[in-house]
Every structure is written in C-alpha cells, then in structure tokens.
Amino acid sequence: MLEGRRLWFVGIGGAGLSSYAFLARAWGAEVGGWDRVDTPYLRQLDGVRVELATEPVVPAGWEVVVSSAYPDVPGTPRAEFLAELVSLRRSIVVAGAHGKTTTTGMIAFVLVELGLDPAWLVGGEVGQLGGNAGAGEGWLVVEGDESDRTVERLRPEIGVVTNVELDHHATFGSEAEVEAMFDEWLASVPQAVRGWELEPVAFELAIPGEHNRRNAASALAALELAGVARGDAEPVLAQFRGAGRRFELVGERNGVTVVDDYAHHPSEIEATLAAARERTDGRVLVLFQPHLYSRTRHLAHELGAALSLADAACVTDVYRAREQPVEGVTGKLVVDALRPG
C-alpha cells in the first residue's frame, strides 16, 4: 500500500511515530528517522536507519513526517499521515478523555486472539500484543488523540469515544467545546460507540476498577460493530491484562505492592485509587507527578482532592512534557489543595 515511498520520521523514538514507522515499513515503505535519544520504542524498528542527534536531521530525498513536538520542521504533520493510514484499511479509532489506550488494546487483543489478524497502533506498550504496533491484514485499530484536535482528521469505519471531560486546557476552553468536537467527529463516521451511554460489563476482568469495566463495554460494542459476536469476545476480553503504565504491577516485596499508573487527571486518579482499594485491604500510598503546567494550573484543587482519597500522598514538581514552564505553577499548588486525612 505504501510501496515506493521513502518516509523519514522526525521524532521516530516516540510512542506514536515509532508505531507509524513500524506499520509504514510493513506496508511497503522504506523508513528512517531522527530523534534526540534512543528509546525502547526503537527496538521494534530493527534495521531501520535512525539518526540520533541534538537537532533534527532530515536527509535529502525523503518524504518527511513530523511529530507534533517539532512544529518548526517542514513536513507532513503526524496527524495527516495517520489519517492516510486510517484511509487505507477498514479502521476502528478510539478516542475520549480517559481509557483510550486500554480500550484500543482490548479491541486489538480480542481480534488477535480470535485469529482475525488485525493491525494496530496503540499509544502505549501492550505486553500481550508484543508492543504498541502490529501489522496484520485485518482491521486497523487506532488510538486517536484529541489533545490537539487531530482526531478530527480521522475517518474510520467505526469511531469510539470512551467518555468526555475537559482535560487539555491549552486546546479547549470548556467541556462544551470538547463535547461539540466529539459530537461532530462521531457524526462523520459510519458507525459510532458512545462509551458513557453503556453499562459497565458485569463479568470479571483480569484488571481491576469500574473504569476498566466501562472500557470493556466500549471495546465490546466496537467489536460487535466489527462483526465479532459478544459471546466470542467476552471470554477473551476477560484475559486481557492491561497496557503499560495502566495499573501496571511493578513488583512486590515484604507485603508491599508497587503499581505504576499514568493517571494524570483527577478523574483518572480517583478511578485508579478505587481500583487499588479493590485489590487490597491495606494502606494506599501515592507518589504523584503533575503532568503539564496548564493542567496543573487549572486543576490543582481537583488534583489535591483526588489524591486525598489515598492514605498518604507525596507530590513532585511538574512534568513539563510539551509545554514551557509557567511562573508560579509548581507541585506545591497540588500539595496546598490536599485535604488533611
């Protein structure tokens, strides 16, 4: 499908572009790329030319696909390239404020286990799938991204929105604006799943939490639209053990269980702590790093309230990710909002 193309990915070591490069190579393109440092995601690109340097390297003679982290580099934006990939195959795209990675992984896992040979692009590692990308011949299952509205460009056969909440304050001014975007996007796809309208599944999953039972309901609805009988999907879905950094067991020693979770929004923190309470009668302790200055500034009070559901919480300084520091916005804003136990 991409035979004869030479595609150079700027930011190839990231979760997103590494998976796009993997699929592009599987679909016939010659691929290469640049990044600042080596990353675990590059392991799946064995034999691919990767330039590691402090500044972007773009050789002549290649089509350039650019990560959103490098907007000043000329080339095709990653969202535009993803839209092309989605257009080449019968596709399922999963979006929403929370649960995208897990729900996307669930759908891909069921399709794999039932022998339906999907391709997939997931925004995190899924151990049971062998990575964040796969290149089967069946459905293409994709995790969409609303943080910069790029999901609007995608035109799958099946669109899934797990839930709607204001999370990305640098992009959206209100929750109503988020709702309007998702309503417009779902209206543009032939078949739609609105996860918040579904009841959580009643059968036992391998991963805890009401939020995961809701993710499973969205996954099952999408699978049914894709032609998979619910009776076939449910027993397979019950075996899904989750994605990396989504209530991921790190280790156990001396009666202490350590779990890593990407929860960075108050609703996600509350859901993760509720899942932890399902798994233990002991104390629940949290080490939390706020993610993004914009989110911390707007949600410091709510973050503090959510963390107060733990027996004790330690808060680090803010992880900047793609943002520049904002004066006066630090982890202390969250600490000050903690409610004394």
Image (spheres, rainbow, N blue to C red):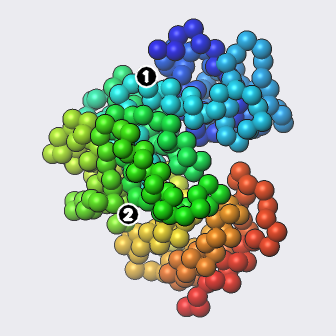
Kind of residue at badge 2: His
| Secondary-structure class at tag 2 | helix
Query: Is 2 or 118 nearer to us in this picture?
Result: 2
Note whether 100 is above or below 211 in the view shown: above
Sequence-first tag of 2 and 1: 1
The image position of residue 73, as x and y in percent, is 76, 31
Residue 34 lies in what quarter of the image?
top right
Q: Is residue 119 left or right of residue 3?
A: left
- Seen at 48% across and 69% down, the residue is 267
The disc placed on residue 211 is 2
- Seen at 27% across and 59% down, the residue is 198
Judge depth for marks 2 and 1 and give the one in front.
1
Q: Is residue 256 left or right of residue 289?
A: left
- Seen at 42% across and 47% down, the residue is 184
Note whether 87 is above or below 70 in the view shown: above
Kind of residue at badge 1: Leu
- The answer to whether residue 175 shows anywhere in this view is yes
Q: Is residue 110 left or right of residue 297?
A: left
- Seen at 29% across and 60% down, the residue is 197
| Secondary-structure class at tag 1 | loop
Residue 129 lies in what quarter of the image?
top left
State how far apart marks 2 and 1 are (Cα): 32 Å
Note whether 61 is above or below 282 in the view shown: above
- The answer to whether residue 102 shows anywhere in this view is no
In the picture of the structure, the residue carrying the numbered disc 1 is: 88
Residue 4 lies in what quarter of the image?
top right
Query: Is 13 or 142 nearer to us in this picture?
Result: 142
Q: Residue furthest top?
A: 4
The image position of residue 273, as x and y in percent, is 46, 72
Q: Residues within 10 Å of mark 1 (few under 14, many from 20)?
A: few
